[in-house]
């Protein structure tokens, strides 16, 4: 029995054929270490959501003059404290925003850095910056455009390799060709939209391979994906950017 997947360079797998899992005689699929890696949540997923959430918070607080200078808040604090209690559930940008707006969040300097394996002692209570507001979602791209009039918008981008790595000044249109490998959804921030040759092109600040990079994305480009071996992994026709959300602060 053989099951295949494709590993992206940032370490999160998907189900394209590149690396094979071979099940030996007497071994069950769930026992295989590579398959366990596919089922278990990767820390990168929660790290990504937390990084994007705090960047949205920092930029909007500066824009509203709630902070006098750009203030970096702790993504690692969200990873340590905002993770859903349900086992196997990763953080989302919306979940991080909801936690920070409800319970507060320390500045980055008052907590361990992102990816740190050590935690402060349980007796340590950082100074929390309390915030008022709510996480607001856009139901569709038209509502996302409306939100963009006031502030950058969090979103997820369907990522294909190697196309995402060869952008430079090109416009990202998803995958094409036999060498295209679907990596999955990655968190980012839409910082603006412009018209290029009559087409809406978004500038996205994408968290990818543990750093931010700017990518120009074709907003109207659609794709679908069929996975006959596991229909639950199939993707119905969709645009490249999905899951839009923002922190909406109350300043009164």
Image: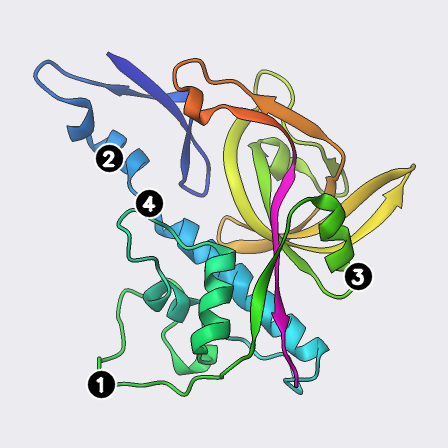
* Crowd class of label 1 (few under 14; some 14 to 19; many from 20; radius 10 Å): few
Residue 16 visible within the image = no
Looking at the image, tell me whether mark 1 or mark 3 is earlier in sequence order. 1
Q: Identify the residue under disc 4.
A: 41
Rendered position, 170 above or below 191: above
Q: Nearer the viewer, mark 3 or mark 4?
A: 3
| Any part of residue 202 in sight | yes
For marks 3 and 2, give the one nearer the viewer.
3
Front-most of residues 52 and 66: 66
Q: Position of residue 232 (x, y in %)?
A: 42, 25
Within 10 Å of disc 3 (Cα), the crowding (few <14, some 14-19, many 20+) is few
Q: Which residue is mark 1?
A: 123
Relative height, residue 76 to residue 40 (above, below): below
Tag 2 residue: 36
Q: Residue at x 53, y 80 (%)?
A: 131
Mark with earlier residue (2, 4): 2
Name the residue tied to disc 3.
Answer: 149
Position above or below: 109 against 29: below
Mark 2 residue element:
helix
**Which quadrant holds residue 133?**
bottom right
Region rendered in magenta: 239-252
**Which circle marks residue 65 in the picture?**
none
């Amino acid at each position: 029995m053989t099951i295949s997947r494709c590993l992206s360079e940032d370490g999160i797998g998907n189900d394209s054929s590149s690396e094979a899992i071979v099940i030996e005689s007497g071994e069950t699929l769930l026992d295989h270490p590579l398959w366990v890696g596919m089922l278990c949540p990767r820390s990168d997923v929660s790290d990504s959501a937390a990084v994007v959430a705090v960047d949205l918070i920092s930029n909007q607080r500066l824009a509203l003059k709630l902070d006098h200078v750009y203030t970096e808040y702790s993504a690692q604090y969200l990873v340590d404290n905002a993770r859903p209690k349900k086992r196997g559930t990763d953080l989302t940008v919306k979940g991080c925003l909801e936690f920070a707006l409800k319970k507060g969040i320390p500045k980055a300097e008052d907590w361990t850095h992102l990816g740190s394996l050590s935690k402060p002692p349980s007796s340590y209570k950082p100074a929390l910056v309390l915030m008022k507001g709510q996480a607001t979602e856009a139901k569709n791209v038209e509502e996302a455009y409306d939100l963009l009039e006031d502030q950058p918008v969090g979103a997820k981008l369907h990522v294909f390799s190697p196309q995402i790595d060869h952008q430079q000044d090109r416009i990202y249109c998803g995958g094409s060709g036999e060498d295209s490998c679907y990596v999955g959804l990655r968190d980012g921030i839409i910082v603006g939209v412009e018209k290029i040759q009559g087409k809406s092109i978004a500038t996205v600040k994408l968290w990818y391979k543990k750093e931010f990079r700017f990518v120009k994305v074709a907003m109207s480009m659609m794709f679908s994906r069929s996975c006959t071996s596991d229909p639950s992994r199939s993707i119905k026709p969709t645009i490249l950017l999905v899951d839009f959300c923002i922190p909406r602060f109350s300043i009164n």
